[in-house]
Image (spheres, rainbow, N blue to C red):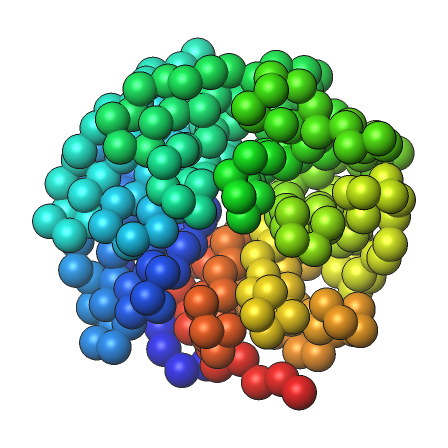
């Protein structure tokens, strides 16, 4: 461990590195978002507007904006350069458990209840809604082109959506991935690799080929639910956090665990890997964020 960031008064729910890797955003049950300078380990801005736990955050590709969603049913778009609220996207009737930016910054996706909503990344205007899940949507992520969304849900299904055609992404075979009814808590999608990855309630991370519609691998090692996963595809690394109080670093090329971090503060709620793949951020039951160097290969 190379640094500990202290400032939140309640556990951490979400973490995100800025695209240049110089800053870290953290979201907490304490209803605030903090922007940290990683060189000094100091808070740059404290973003206050949510009136309940902040559950999910994501940086825009240029690093100038941050979107947040929370238990207060709200989604906010922030100017992180000045630490001010820029746009109120919408107030919902359900908790917002996941938010994501497209790679070009033009779209924002969010999961609230069993509905996915797509917004304009600049104005905050809603573009469309997507329905189909039968439970809480726990994770949304956009592909590299921004044309497809993967969503994970407590109904045990990961769905791949073509957001331009208002249909599932079918490509001859795939429209949804069944995980034997096991709730999904986090999801990642790479269109370039034809790969979708889910973190499941049974502690297993499952990898699926979205063209062949088949399970291609399982990463086993956690003994309780996998709350959060993140990756750095340039380094072929995937990181995971679990209720078993462990974070693991996986080599995607071999499917093996190459490092195991025991977190003595309890369940790992949030995890993020830096854009260069060299640093890992963890948030857990405690109020602190730990920063680790990643050593691999």
**Where is residue 205 shown, x and y percent of the image?**
76, 53
Would you say residue 183 is visible in this rendering?
yes
Q: Quadrant of residue 175?
A: top right
Q: Choose between 34 and 145: the one closer to the eye.
A: 145
Q: Left or right: where does residue 127 sit relative to residue 263?
A: left
Residue 263 placement (x, y as % from top left): 56, 68
Seen in the picture, residue 159 relative to 232 is either above or below; the reply is above
Name the side, left or right, on which 232 lies relative to 99: right
Q: Which of these two is toward me, 192 or 200?
A: 192
Q: Point out the residue furthest to the left here.
A: 82
Q: Position of residue 212 (x, y in %)?
A: 87, 43
Name the residue at 35% across, 51% down: 61
Q: Quick check: 26 above or below 143? A: below
When the figure is inspected, residue 224 is found, relative to residue 159, above or below; the finding is below
Q: Quadrant of the C terminus?
A: bottom right
Q: Please give the name of the residue rendered at 47% of the width and 21% of the height, measured from the top-left corner.
A: 117
Please name the residue shown 73% across and 49% down the image: 194
On screen, 79 above or below 37?
A: above
Asked which quadrant contains residue 65, the reply is top left
Residue 180 location, x and y as percent? 88, 34
Can I make out residue 224 in this image?
no
Left or right position of 9 against 241: left
Q: Quadrant of residue 37?
A: bottom left
């Amino acid at each position: 461990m190379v640094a500990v960031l202290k400032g939140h008064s309640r556990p951490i729910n979400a973490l995100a590195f800025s695209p240049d890797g110089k800053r870290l955003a953290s979201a907490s049950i304490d209803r605030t978002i903090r922007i940290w300078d990683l060189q000094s380990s100091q808070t740059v801005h404290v973003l206050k507007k949510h009136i309940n736990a902040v559950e999910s955050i994501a940086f825009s590709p240029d690093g100038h904006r941050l979107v947040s969603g929370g238990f207060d049913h709200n989604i906010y778009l922030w100017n992180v350069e000045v630490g001010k609220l820029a746009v109120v996207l919408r107030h919902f009737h359900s908790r917002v458990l996941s938010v994501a930016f497209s790679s070009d910054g033009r779209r924002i996706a969010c999961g609230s209840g069993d509905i996915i909503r797509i917004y304009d990344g600049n104005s905050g205007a809603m573009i469309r809604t997507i329905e189909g899940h039968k439970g809480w949507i726990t994770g949304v992520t956009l592909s590299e082109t921004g044309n497809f969304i993967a969503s994970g849900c407590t109904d045990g299904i990961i769905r791949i959506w073509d957001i331009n055609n208002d249909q599932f992404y079918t490509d001859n075979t795939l429209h949804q991935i069944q995980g034997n009814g096991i709730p999904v808590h986090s999801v990642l999608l790479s269109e370039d690799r034809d790969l979708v990855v889910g973190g499941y309630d049974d502690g297993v991370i499952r990898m699926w080929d979205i063209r062949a519609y088949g399970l291609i691998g399982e990463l086993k090692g956690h003994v309780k639910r996998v709350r959060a996963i993140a990756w750095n595809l340039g380094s072929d690394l995937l990181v995971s956090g679990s209720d078993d109080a462990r974070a693991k670093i996986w080599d995607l090329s071999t499917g093996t665990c190459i490092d195991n971090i025991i977190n003595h503060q309890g369940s790992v709620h949030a995890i993020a890997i830096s854009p260069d793949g060299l640093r890992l951020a963890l948030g857990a039951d405690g109020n602190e964020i730990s920063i680790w160097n990643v050593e691999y290969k």
